[in-house]
Image (cartoon, coloured by chain):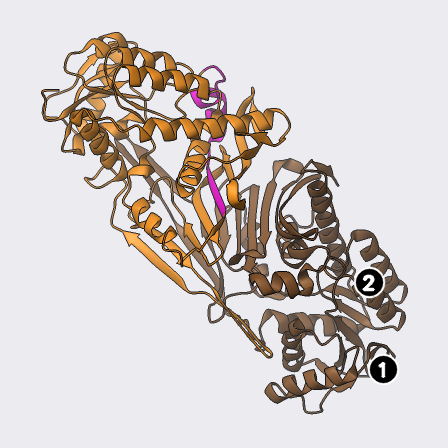
Chain colours: A brown, B orange
Amino acid sequence: MASKVCRWGILGAANIARKNWKAIRNAENATLTAVASREPSRAKEWIAGCQSECPFPTVPEACDYDALLKHPNVDAVYIPLPTGIRPEWVLKAANAGKHILCEKPCAPDAGQLRTMIDACKAKNVQFMDGVMFMHGKRLPLLRSVLDDGETVGTLRRVATQFSFAAGDDFLTGNIRVNPALEPLGALGDLGWYNIRFTLWVMKYLLPTKVCGRLLTEHSGVPLEFSAELFFPGGVSASFYCSFNTELQQWAHVSGTKGSVAVRDFVLPFYGCESEFVADRPVFNVKGTSYHWESHPKRFAVTEYSDGTPDAQETNMICTFSGLALSGKLDPTWPEIALKTQLVMDACLASARKGAVLVDL
Amino acid sequence: MASKVCRWGILGAANIARKNWKAIRNAENATLTAVASREPSRAKEWIAGCQSECPFPTVPEACDYDALLKHPNVDAVYIPLPTGIRPEWVLKAANAGKHILCEKPCAPDAGQLRTMIDACKAKNVQFMDGVMFMHGKRLPLLRSVLDDGETVGTLRRVATQFSFAAGDDFLTGNIRVNPALEPLGALGDLGWYNIRFTLWVMKYLLPTKVCGRLLTEHSGVPLEFSAELFFPGGVSASFYCSFNTELQQWAHVSGTKGSVAVRDFVLPFYGCESEFVADRPVFNVKGTSYHWESHPKRFAVTEYSDGTPDAQETNMICTFSGLALSGKLDPTWPEIALKTQLVMDACLASARKGAVLVDL
């Protein structure tokens, strides 16, 4: 790659992609060459909207999907297309030699994701799923606390909940509840984060068994889903994701010595420092005195959630661009995306069979 | 009842009873007549310990169980005896005409509890389980917030976790893991609170189905247990309780409009106000801006956790004493104790059958 910056194309003028427009704009080692839509006129309109608010020095080109993949000045593509058609375009992008940042859930199932990842490997292009929280400054700090042996001790339980209240229009009109486009519904859209966070805590050890439960569905698409994951060594994890419940995005990790709570693990609440709180309560029971004392300890990093230079989405684009520019691929990203999808598949398989235990 | 104060007897010189010694001492409408142990000498020693720290004007008498139940100056008994032998002594106490404050889990199963409750009804004595958090100042405030229609909206999910790390000596020597004395282990000792809090949130609507899972056990006694409860209308609840995980005691209630978090629902952490935090986050997504804003609102009442006049345990003794003195029994207390035990039984039955769904 001759360029000193990674030249991006966005394959699909989706709402979510506006955020990555800004992240590409803010990343020092990235620029945006083109945006594709089925109808280039739609891409043009979309570009005009973003450009008026957050301009690139050179206006990105509007084109259709095929033209984007053939574009000589596109090194990497961000693919926010619906899950149902994503595998097809990931394969095309890989075959066109483009590095791929892929929205989640990566594919309708792990089999298709494996094919996509194999294609990327064969063509020597980087694959990564677009999980922004993986790139925040908070996780390294949280890792050091989880690993210190004292704050949490030996892990026992991980609990996460991620939801937002979608509203009736969403549930009838939105692609996120269309079985052909988003067959995994809230499990794919939200549960992907629950599972990824849990796997991150577990250092990507896979659960040996999972149990999933479809709490609410619409045309077979999960709207509300809960699951429990069982790991070697007795650690268990529960998660809940929902389109029926107002925004919550919390995680709680507890062990033999204490616990850590994160109230916004997916996207740090705007205007707040990115933080978490550890607690190692003390029993103070003596005679007729019966105290439980809390000793919360706050850990924080300064990080903003709106496309500023150190936002997690900007870091994601920077990291990906660096990998693309270096030519030295990182096999960890496709591997953890696949693990996430394997766990998701097993949770859904369990739910479809009436919440039986499913082996991984 | 001629007395203006309720005259208590403590049936069993247990550690946990020291706290209620202090609560009886602090309650204006209560006094302590006697403490019983199998060996009166043990009760005498126990009384001396408590008396030196938190004295009654008249030193309570030491006696054995039968003498306590025959004592003419005992109106109400607090029974902290182990679960395995509790039904026997509750029946004897009821037949002796004593009002009964019963430690939890009330009985090894709901069938035995029903017999106990029927005996109390037949003898016209009050029955109540010793769930102190029911008597804190926080719950009425939390109820008003849950019912305001705006903060949480329509309920969707309740999650609670209650645990403490018991240590190896506990797991081998403590009665709480002895199958004859405490057959319900952590599920009875801790899960009782998870279930009660959840039922309280649901205004004592019973779940239609539950699923329970024995995560760790010792001689058949649950040491770590998780469950999910399914209510009419689509509300679901999960809980986790454990003797293997350091102290945590949090609850999270979420609905279509927001959520409420309580970090210490069982026993307010010492030195802290009794509080909870509501949040109704706002999505602020416009163009390339993508904010999620948190709007936490703290609610607090001043309440202390160590036997002071407005501590929840003191309130419990006051409320119970008031009922006993009035002669007008409150049937709600035995009813909600029974519901708690029914849900617990169903969770354990589910777990014993491999976490199948069990109907209630």
Depth check, front residue: B236 or B93: B236
Q: Nearer the viewer, mark 1 or mark 2?
A: 2
Q: Position of residue A250 (x, y in %)?
A: 52, 55
Q: Which residues are magenta?
A: B157-180
How packed mark 1 is, by other alpha carbons closer than 10 Å (few <14, some 14-19, many 20 or more), is: some
Q: Secondary structure at mark 2?
A: helix
Q: Which residue bears the numbered disc 2?
A: A87
Does the CB distance between marks 1 and 2 fall below 8 Å?
A: no
**Residue A142 shows in this picture:** yes
Query: Which numbered disc, 1 or 2, marks the residue that appears first in the sequence?
Result: 1
Name the residue located 44 percent from the left edge and 62 percent from the top edge: B280
Rendered view: A187 above or below B57: below
In the image shown, does B42 or A221 lie closer to the viewer?
A221
What's the chain of the residue with tag 2?
A: A
Q: Indicate the chain on which mark 1 is placed.
A: A
Which amino acid type is marked by label 1?
His
Give the spatial CA distance, label 1 vs label 2.
Answer: 20 Å
Residue B297 x/y as whole percent? 37, 61
Residue under circle 1? Answer: A71
Task: State whether residue B224 is above or below residue B153.
Answer: above
Residue B129: x percent and y percent?
34, 27
| Left or right, A275 with reference to B132 | right
Number of residues whose C-alpha sits closer than 10 Å to that of mark 2, classed few (under 14), some (14–19) or many (20 or more) = many
Quarter of the picture holding the N terminus of chain B: top left
Q: Quadrant of residue B351?
A: top right
> Quadrant location of residue B153?
bottom left
Question: Which quadrant of the figure has residue A134?
Answer: bottom right
Q: Amino acid at mark 2?
A: Pro
Q: Residue at x 26, y 23 (%)?
A: B126
Tell me the residue at 22%/23% (across/down). B49
